[in-house]
């Protein structure tokens, strides 16, 4: 570079830093074009300076970080003023210029092959850590403005908000703070999902990368954010939005009309949605599954399996590719269903769906490479998983019918004289029509429970659920789980007998854990080691505090001691997956010849 040009550039950079040493005006008037012009000019100069590879970039970035407090004071003031509304022609022009510069001001990350992550990442992290007020909160505010107005800077803003969250993950305190900013703000969550729903309706090529980033951002947040924030993020409203998008994306007629670029992106979107819904299953349990089943998402999964071959044959560019194939995503999604089939609101719709024959393939007319062979390895794996779901669903249905034939009287009224009686024939039960959870043997018991034992309070709690997702565990479901647990002790009699013989104590506790697989995991402990083993095997609910967990263990121990006093040598502690990281747990006596 000629000496004169170099000196001129150095002088401009020095002037820029000097400009931001000035106090921030108490009011920035968009009509004051001279002051704003200089501010935007100098911000652009510094943004370019930190990315100039013809100079010592490390030194440029170090200088920028050192001066960041002054730069951020001016930048945050500009954000506040333009968000409050610059409506004049000059104000709108300045706002648009500022939005285009903003991503390069608040982050030193450079997208694409020109970036240097090892240099940019720690420097960008320093900007976020040294910002007061919080820079990420302002990033989200500007991002949401771009989303709501469909501003031309939207693509760079999507990249910025995702990259900044990734960068902050190097400092867990900052990362969790940023996650809280996202998860606790309805101004972020609702517009984001609204943007996705609107954009999916009409997949135009210019919006594909923004939509890709939106799905990737949600997926990454759900994977990494603390559980409490995930619960606020994955609400009934957001899950319903994802369900709608999922049903729309693979529509055969619609898919056939997409450009090849949009078709490839659509397959990637499906993978992200399946990944998010799978995490929602783990988080919310059966209530999320019921919501998805009612939206016929599982039906869409099975009847659009032709896309598995399309995904395999066409592939995706590395920059947008999800880490799993569509077949793997489908399989992961379906493999979670069997562990929740003891809930009748999960079992019944799954059975209705699986009673219909699933076609060997359903081609998407007009789309090349979308006609999978039945022997295609990816497609075969998907069908194997589907077959396992189908087999277990009909097994549980047969056992549930056997349980119903015993005619067990199940009644929530504490004063019911017939509670626990077996009629040995199918018994017609009454259910609260509002919460659809509580069961009674008669209308008389239902009225007594409502008036005397204030079922109204429990009913409100059940209907409210968590974040709009109603509780789905019924009294009958829990009784069936207890019955099924004892049934499994007979099925696995030899294994259990061998385990019990290894413990030479007067009182044995057999844990049967159904939370991960349809075949229970077994382990045996003694009453003296019960507390230690309960913590070690995560028997207590993850959502509870330590004090609540201790109280829960004490309650279980009291029941175990009660069985010991009654002369029982072995009890069973059954554990099933429940709602919101909670377990369905119970203690049963076991009479088993060993």
Image (tube, helix red, strand yellow):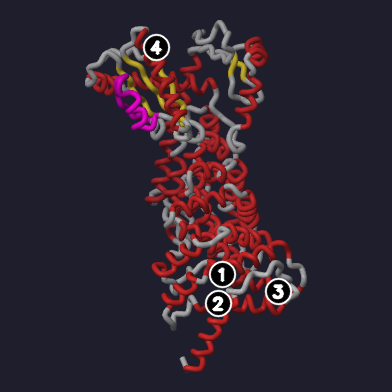
Residue 209 x/y as whole percent: 55, 63
Depth check: 251 or 561 in front? 561
Distance of mark 3 from mark 1, alpha carbons? 24 Å
Residue 350 x/y as whole percent: 52, 34
Tag 2 near tag 1, CB within 8 Å: yes
**To which residue does mark 3 refer?**
93
User: Which of pointers 1 and 4 lies earlier in the amino acid sequence?
Assistant: 1
Label 3: element kind: helix
In this view, the mark in front (3 or 1): 1
User: Which of pointers 4 and 3 lies earlier in the amino acid sequence?
Assistant: 3
Label 1: element kind: helix
Distance of mark 3 from mark 2, alpha carbons? 24 Å
User: Which of pointers 2 and 1 lies earlier in the amino acid sequence?
Assistant: 2
User: Which of pointers 3 and 1 lies earlier in the amino acid sequence?
Assistant: 1
Tag 3 near tag 2, CB within 8 Å: no
In the image, the segment drawn in magenta is: 519-539
**To which residue does mark 2 refer?**
17
User: Which of pointers 4 and 2 lies earlier in the amino acid sequence?
Assistant: 2
**To which residue does mark 4 refer?**
562
Residue 207 x/y as whole percent: 60, 64
Badge 2, how many Cα within 10 Å: few under 14, some, many 20+? many
Label 2: element kind: helix
Label 4: element kind: helix
Residue 416 x/y as whole percent: 57, 8
Badge 1, how many Cα within 10 Å: few under 14, some, many 20+? some
For residue 499, what is the image quadrant?
Answer: top left
| Residue shown at the point (74%, 67%) measured from the top left | 86
Say the numbered circle drawn on residue 130: none
Tag 4 near tag 2, CB within 8 Å: no
| Residue shown at the point (57%, 11%) measured from the top left | 414
**To which residue does mark 1 refer?**
70
């Amino acid at each position: 570079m000629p000496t004169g040009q170099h000196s001129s550039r150095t002088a401009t950079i020095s002037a820029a830093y000097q400009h931001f040493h000035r106090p921030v005006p108490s009011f920035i008037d968009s009509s004051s074009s001279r002051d704003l012009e200089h501010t935007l000019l100098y911000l652009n100069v510094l943004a370019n300076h930190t990315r100039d590879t013809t100079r010592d970039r490390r030194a440029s970035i170090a200088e920028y970080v050192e001066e960041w407090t002054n730069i951020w004071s001016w930048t945050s003031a500009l954000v506040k003023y333009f968000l409050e509304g610059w409506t004049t022609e000059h104000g709108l022009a300045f706002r648009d210029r500022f939005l285009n510069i903003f991503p390069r001001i608040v982050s030193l990350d450079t997208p694409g092959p020109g970036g240097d992550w090892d240099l940019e990442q720690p420097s960008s992290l320093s900007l976020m850590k040294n910002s007061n007020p919080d820079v990420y909160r302002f990033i989200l505010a500007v991002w949401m403005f771009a989303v709501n107005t469909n501003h031309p800077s939207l693509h760079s803003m999507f990249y910025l908000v995702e990259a900044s969250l990734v960068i902050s993950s190097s400092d867990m305190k900052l990362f969790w703070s940023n996650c809280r900013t996202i998860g606790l703000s309805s101004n972020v969550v609702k517009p984001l999902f609204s943007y996705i729903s609107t954009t999916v309706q009409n997949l135009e090529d210019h919006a594909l990368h923004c939509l890709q980033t939106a799905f990737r951002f949600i997926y990454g947040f759900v994977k990494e954010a603390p559980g409490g924030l995930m619960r606020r993020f994955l609400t009934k409203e957001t899950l319903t939005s994802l369900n709608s998008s999922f049903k729309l994306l693979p529509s055969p007629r619609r898919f056939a009309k997409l450009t090849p670029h949009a078709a490839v992106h659509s397959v990637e979107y499906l993978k992200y949605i399946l990944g998010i819904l799978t995490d929602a299953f783990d988080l919310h349990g059966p209530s999320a599954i019921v919501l998805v089943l009612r939206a016929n998402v599982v039906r869409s999964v099975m009847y659009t399996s032709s896309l598995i071959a399309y995904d395999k044959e066409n592939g995706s560019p590395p920059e947008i590719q999800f880490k799993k194939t569509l077949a793997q995503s489908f399989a992961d999604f379906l493999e979670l269903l069997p562990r929740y089939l003891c809930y009748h609101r999960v079992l019944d719709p799954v059975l209705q769906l699986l009673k219909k024959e699933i076609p060997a393939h359903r081609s998407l007319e007009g789309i090349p490479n979308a006609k999978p062979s039945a022997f295609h390895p990816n497609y075969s794996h998907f069908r194997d998983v589907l077959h396992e779901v189908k087999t277990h669903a009909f097994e549980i249905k047969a056992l549930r019918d056997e349980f119903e034939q015993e005619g067990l009287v199940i009644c929530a009224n504490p004063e019911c004289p017939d509670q626990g009686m077996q009629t040995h024939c199918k018994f017609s039960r009454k259910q609260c029509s509002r919460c659809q959870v509580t069961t009674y043997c008669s209308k008389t018991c239902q009225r007594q429970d409502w008036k005397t034992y204030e079922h109204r309070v429990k009913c409100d709690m059940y209907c409210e659920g968590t974040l709009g997702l109603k509780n789905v565990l019924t009294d009958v479901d829990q009784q069936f789980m207890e019955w099924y647990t004892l049934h499994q002790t007979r099925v696995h009699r030899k294994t259990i007998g061998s385990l019990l013989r290894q413990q030479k104590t007067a009182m044995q506790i057999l844990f049967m854990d159904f939370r991960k697989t349809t075949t229970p995991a077994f382990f045996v402990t003694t009453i003296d080691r019960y507390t230690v083993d309960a913590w070690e095997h995560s028997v207590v609910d993850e959502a509870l505090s330590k004090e609540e967990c201790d109280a829960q263990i004490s309650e279980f121990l009291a029941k175990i001691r009660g069985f010991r006093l009654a002369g029982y040598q072995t009890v069973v502690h059954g554990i099933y997956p429940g709602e919101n990281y909670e377990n369905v747990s119970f203690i049963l006596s076991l009479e088993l010849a060993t």
